[in-house]
């Protein structure tokens, strides 16, 4: 391999790395955007099934079809969202995953004929600041 080919290969590798890093900053989950000092944020969520009459039932309560939230969702602390968790992948990525989990559970619980949607009331503590609340909703069933 000649010097010109080595330079082209090096520039190509560096270019690909830069594209992946730039993409990570605009993607909901920054897989290739490693940061030396990640944020020290925390989150905690209460998740409810919303019935046709508007009433809410905590997903920890018995669920038609025998479903259990922690059996359906088990990634990055999402299976037990009721306790405070460190947002090890960042709050944006964690909320993206929780929102996707709500949609997935709503779409994949066919024996539950009562629930019209799922709601998560999330308490966010971004880098030690005052807590804020975010409400996420699944797609309607």
Image (cartoon, grey):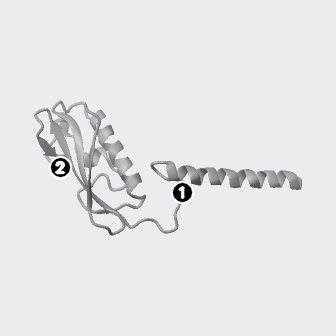
Q: Residue at x 12, y 37 (%)?
A: 54
**Toward which corner of the image does residue 50 lie, by quadrant?**
top left
Task: Determine the secondary structure under disc 2.
Answer: loop
Name the spot of residue 19 as percent of width and height, x first: 62, 50
Question: In the rendered image, is residue 77 in sight?
Answer: yes
Name the spot of residue 97 as percent of width and height, x first: 37, 48
Q: Any mark on residue 114, and which?
A: none
Asked whether, in this view, residue 60 is left or right of residue 25, the answer is: left
Q: Nearer the viewer, residue 114 or 62?
A: 114
Task: Determine the secondary structure under disc 1.
Answer: loop
Question: In the rendered image, is residue 108 in sight?
Answer: no
Q: Any mark on residue 33, and which?
A: 1
Name the spot of residue 77 as percent of width and height, x first: 33, 56
Mark 2 and mark 1: Cα distance apart in space: 35 Å
Q: Nearer the viewer, residue 37 or 72?
A: 37
Q: Residue at x 50, y 49 (%)?
A: 26
Packing grade of label 2 (10 A; few <14, some 14-19, many >=20) is some
Q: Any mark on residue 60, and which?
A: 2
Total count of labels: 2
Q: Residue at x 23, y 44 (%)?
A: 119
Q: Nearer the viewer, mark 2 or mark 1?
A: 1
Q: Are marks 2 and 1 in contact (CB under 8 Å)?
A: no
Q: Quadrant of the C terminus?
A: top left
**Toward which corner of the image does residue 39 lie, by quadrant?**
bottom left
Name the spot of residue 83 as percent of width and height, x first: 24, 61
Q: Compared to 111, does 33 lie above or below?
A: below
Q: Nearer the viewer, residue 102 or 113?
A: 102
């Amino acid at each position: 391999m000649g010097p010109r080919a080595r330079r082209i290969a090096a520039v190509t590798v560096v270019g690909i790395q830069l594209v992946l890093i730039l993409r990570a900053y605009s993607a909901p989950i920054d897989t290739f955007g490693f940061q030396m000092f990640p944020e020290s944020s925390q989150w905690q969520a209460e998740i409810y099934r919303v019935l046709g009459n508007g009433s809410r039932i905590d997903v920890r309560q018995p669920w038609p079809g025998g479903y259990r939230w922690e059996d359906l969702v088990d990634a990055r602390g999402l299976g037990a969202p009721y306790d405070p968790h460190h947002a090890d992948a960042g709050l944006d990525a964690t909320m993206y995953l929780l929102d996707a989990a709500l949609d997935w559970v709503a779409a994949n619980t066919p024996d539950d004929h009562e629930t019209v949607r799922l709601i998560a009331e999330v308490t966010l503590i971004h880098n030690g600041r005052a807590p804020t609340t975010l409400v996420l909703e699944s797609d309607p069933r």
